[in-house]
Image (cartoon, rainbow, N blue to C red):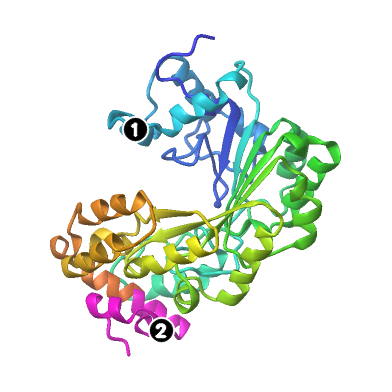
Amino acid sequence: MNKPNNFCVLPWIHLETSANGFARPCCIYSGHYKNSDNSNVSMKDNNITQAMNSYGARMIRKAFENNEKPDGCKLCWDIESAGGTSKRIESNNKYSDKFDSTIKPIYLDLKFGTTCNLKCRICSPWSSSKWLKDQKILDEDPNNPVLKVEHIYPKKDWSEQNNNFWNDFMNIVGNVEHFDFTGGEPMMIQKHKEVLKHCVEKGYSKYQTIHYNTNGTYYDKDFAKNVLSKFKFVDVMFSIDGIKGQFEYQRHPAKWEEVNRNIKLWQSHGFYTHVCCTVNVQNILYLDDMIYYCKDNNLPIYLNIMQAPEHFNIKSLPLHMKKEVDKMLNNVKVDNKQIKQIINFMYSENWWEDKDYTKGNIKYFITKNDELRNEKFATHFGEAAEYLEIYNV
């Protein structure tokens, strides 16, 4: 098959499963694979092989064969229009020699459910089961400025009792060259460890690479030493948005000393370890502490700019706070190309002044969750609390 200009290899070699149990061609695709009746392809009813051969998957492949631009791939088209290198282009470059027109799962991005032991401030029940109780209270609160019309909550774990999924995964796993495991909290899913142990026993692991995104609260010495160390390459990315008390506030009920110790234990195995810090309204004024911690502990850091919800997007900061953030970041003595991007993004819109609900939404969601968790934002983020006019002291 001659590959057209708009071609993307991913629908032939890749599948992403969401924490809520739906399938799509990649993690940045807008929407999910559809059945012929326009319902979402659910992993509760399908395995990997079935999802990759679903009606929606076939339609996406047909569109690419016809040199069309599927609407769900808009992010890639936008990046390319701006002169950037999209996931489509990166994937084509990386996997072009693997493509032979057959449907073969070479690269899998698997979220096994919302099972998680933390209820991070930036998260929701659609990624963490621990959030569900608090979310129900928020959704019933008449003072909630963004009340949901329908209360439809995700189930905790679509994969747990899904033998169809796990049996198929075990059968096709020898084809896979790279795994992304995120969550939820992937280290809590025991069955995936059994699949990886199977890869070791069959000798597949010598040719396979793994990426984890974990909250750092779990360390399994036996799994790390006797299973993961047998793979070609393993990288473990820790989701950390601050240090010490600020970390514990943002990633309740995790304990900083435990996570800090676990990071060092994971590092002791020689895995590539790094940090994903989600930059948001609550932590941005203290980002220098996070950057220096990572530098001191040999942890490359990725600064992930939070997009939604709006009230935690850094475009929502008041202008005088943005100026303090700008000054702080420009004084950071660590070379990080993302710092300039963060500053530019922060200044690109002024939602504190331009959207009359922004200030109230920030205050509501911080103080209401403080009430539910018996915490106080100002205790750990005193200067930010002043700027954001949060006085729950």
> How many numbered marks, from 0 up?
2
Numbered disc 2: secondary structure: helix
Looking at marks 1 and 2 on the same chain, the residue that comes earlier in the sequence is marked by 1
Find residue 64 and name its label.
none
**Relative to 292, is 200 above or below?**
above
Image quadrant where residue 389 sits: bottom left
Which residue is rendered at x = 31% and y = 69% of the image? 285
| Dot 1 alpha-carbon crowd within 10 angstroms: few under 14, some 14 to 19, many 20 or more | few
Q: Is residue 383 magenta?
A: yes
Q: Of discs 1 and 2, which sits in the foreground?
A: 1
Residue identified by numbered label 2: 371
Image quadrant containing the C terminus: bottom left
Q: Residue at x 62, y 16 (%)?
A: 100
- Name the quadrant containing residue 382: bottom left
Q: Quadrant of the N terminus?
A: top right
- Badge 1 is on which residue? 84
Marks 2 and 1: in contact by CB < 8 Å? no
Whether the magenta-drawn stretch holds residue 15 is answered as no
Residue visible at 29% across and 71% down in the picture: 362
Question: Residue 295, position in %: x, y?
Answer: 48, 61
> Is residue 255 visible to us here?
no
Q: Residue furthest bottom?
A: 393
Q: Identify the amino acid type marked 1.
A: Gly
Q: Main SS of the magenta segment? A: helix
Say left or right for 29 vs 205. Answer: left
Q: Describe residue 89's horizontal placement relative to residue 170 as left or right.
A: left
Which residue is situated farthest in the left direction here?
Answer: 354
Asked whether, in this view, residue 228 is left or right of residue 113, the answer is right
Name of the residue lying farthest toward the front: 333
Q: Which residues are magenta?
A: 366-393
> Helix, strand, or loop for circle 1?
loop
Amino acid found under the numbered disc labelled 2: Glu
